[in-house]
Every structure is written in structure tokens, then in C-alpha cells.
Image (tube, grey):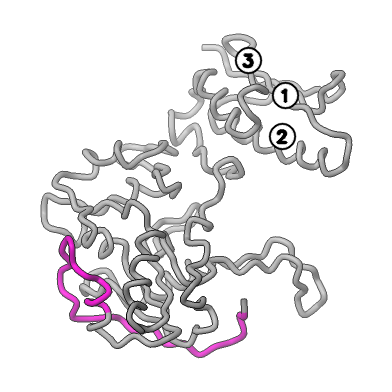
Amino acid sequence: MNRSPAFISCLPLIGIGEIQMGDNLAEILSVATPLLDGDILVVTSKAISKAEGRVRAGDRTEMLADETDRVVAARGNTSIVRTHHGLVMAAAGIDGSNTAPGTVVLLPVDPDASARALRERIGSNGGPNVAIVISDTSGRAWRNGQTDIAIGAAGLDVIDDYAGRADDYGNLLEVTAPAVADEIAGTGDLVKGKVHRSPAAVLRGLAHLVLDHGSHGPGAQMLIRNEVDDMFGHGAREAVRGFGRPAPPEELVAALAAHCGPEHVRITSAHEVETRVPGGPSGADQRALGCLEARLTAVAFAMGWSFTAGDASVPGLDLMLRFGAPTP
């Protein structure tokens, strides 16, 4: 992907009006502004959801359970949850703004599929080749405020992986991977705003990012970190349960098993859980086990358990860890 300096423009699409279930968004957006080959169209998830009939009567609390895959943290009336999409968001992204009183708007069922369908409709019958980013507002760990992120995308590579490239000083880049779709979503939000009834924006000057008609790209799902590799997705014990209160051993076993497999975890007593993970002799195997150990200990700590013992010398084993919980 070419990230050479570019001059871009970002314009809001105004005069769209209220989106209703069944509306032809492709036609509505194309009428709002003539779209050109190479444009990137940023559309709020709310506009997509309204057109797809995802408006419900009730409040967030009533809808939260059905939209939640797992609670990450809860404090007072605020819940941070992992949705069925894999997104970690406050209140599962359920929104009560810019909708009729007494109703809320749920996230699209499949935002990437929605982005692909919208792109295909705009490009049909000789229409322009555009990319689509479906955006939603999200908070960030360790940061105040919110920004828009991409929850759906079609027609562009959502990440630009720099791994293997060198910087101007010859340093090899290993983990640099700009989230291009998120950067585009945030740019669009600067002009869309939250209270001006402008649910879409068009970016121009980034045509080199737009894929050919026949390729939609990997979608925004690629931006969601695999839960097994996410050291922060289990929340913190003081945020979920109250400081110092450990999870039951069965819950810890389930959480650890997600990382190393259920066959490698067992409860040895009411206050002790053990993992035994075999590995190979190579350096790569040992590095992988080291990363696994870091994840397992982080998960255990988040759930109120502590590392008590490790033994890499047991015959036939390369990693054995014991975790303990304080007795009541």
C-alpha cells in the first residue's frame, strides 16, 4: 500500500434527512453528492442500522443481554462488553441518540456484509468504484474522549502492515501496522459531526487505497484482535467483581482454556488451578511458550488469582504453572 504524502479533501453529505427501514442508501447517498471513482465513503453505523431495521423500542438495559457475547467490565450502570461481532464497546454499541424517544439503535448484524452490499449497489450499472467504511464511535483504553472507528469496510485494505520494511535509518520495522480504516473513520467524523444530521462523508485524494471493483478486501473484521491473543480483553478484577474478589475456579479454567486448550487445564483444589502445556525443544517453541505463559498469568491476575509456582523440569513437560486464589 502506498502511503506517500497526499492532499485529501473530506466533505460531509448534507440534506439526507431521516433514514427509514428499507431506504435505498446507495441512491440517497449518490443523490446527496455525485460520487467519483476512487472516493472513500464513510457512513455511520446508525444510518446502516436504520435502513436495515435495527431500531428497537426500549432502552439499552433491555437490549444489552442479547447484544452481548461476554461482559468485560462493569461498574455502576456502565458495562463494557464484547459483542457478537467481537467488538469491545460500552453497552454493546447500543445507541439512544439521534433516534425517536423511547427507541434505541443496535449495531448492524454484519457490518462488513453491509459495506460490501452498499459498495456493490453504488458501483452497479456502470456506477463509480468507491470504497466504503462503516464507522461507529468508541472509547479507547487509557484515553479520555471518543473517536470513530471502522466496524465495517469494503473496497480497501484496512491495515497497512509495515513488517519487514525499513525506515529512513535502516531500522527494520516489525510491529508497525497503521489501521488505515480507523484513520479514515476518524477523519470522516471531523466533518460529519454528531448533531448536524450528516450521517456520511466522502474522502477524496486517496484513490490509491481503493481496490478494484472485483475485490472488497478483508473487511473491518481484520481489525478485531483475536481474543486468544488479547491480553487486555478480560478486563480487571476490580472493574468486574470488586477489588480482591477472585473468580470461581471453573471460570478461571474456562478463561485459561481459551488460550491453551481445555486438555491442559485442571482444578487441583478449591483454591488451586494448574496448567500443563507440552512444547518442543526449538527456540521458536520456547518463545511461543514464553508468550503463552505471559498471557496465562495476565488472565489469572485479571480474575483475582495469582501465580504460585512454575516448573519446567518435569519430564515430558515444557511449561507447568499453578495459580492460587486467596482463601475466604
Residue 271 in which image quadrant: top right
In 3D space, how far apart are the residues under numbered discs 3 and 1 (Cα atoms)? 10 Å
Location of mark 1 (residue): 321
- Asked whether, in this view, residue 280 is left or right of residue 207, the answer is right
Q: Give me the disc on residue 272.
A: 3
Task: Out of 67 and 71, give the one closest to the viewer.
Answer: 67
In 3D space, how far apart are the residues under numbered discs 2 and 1 (Cα atoms)? 8 Å
Q: Give, as a three-letter code, the residue at label 3.
A: Glu
Q: Give, as a three-letter code, the residue at label 2.
A: Glu
- Give me the residue at 84% from left, 34% from top: 280
Residue 130 at x, y = what percent?
A: 41, 79
Q: Which residues are magenta?
A: 2-29
Location of mark 2 (residue): 293
Residue 52 position (above or below residue 294): below
Within 10 angstroms of label 2, few (less than 14), some, or many (20 or more) residues? many
- Asked whether, in this view, residue 170 is left or right of residue 162, the answer is right
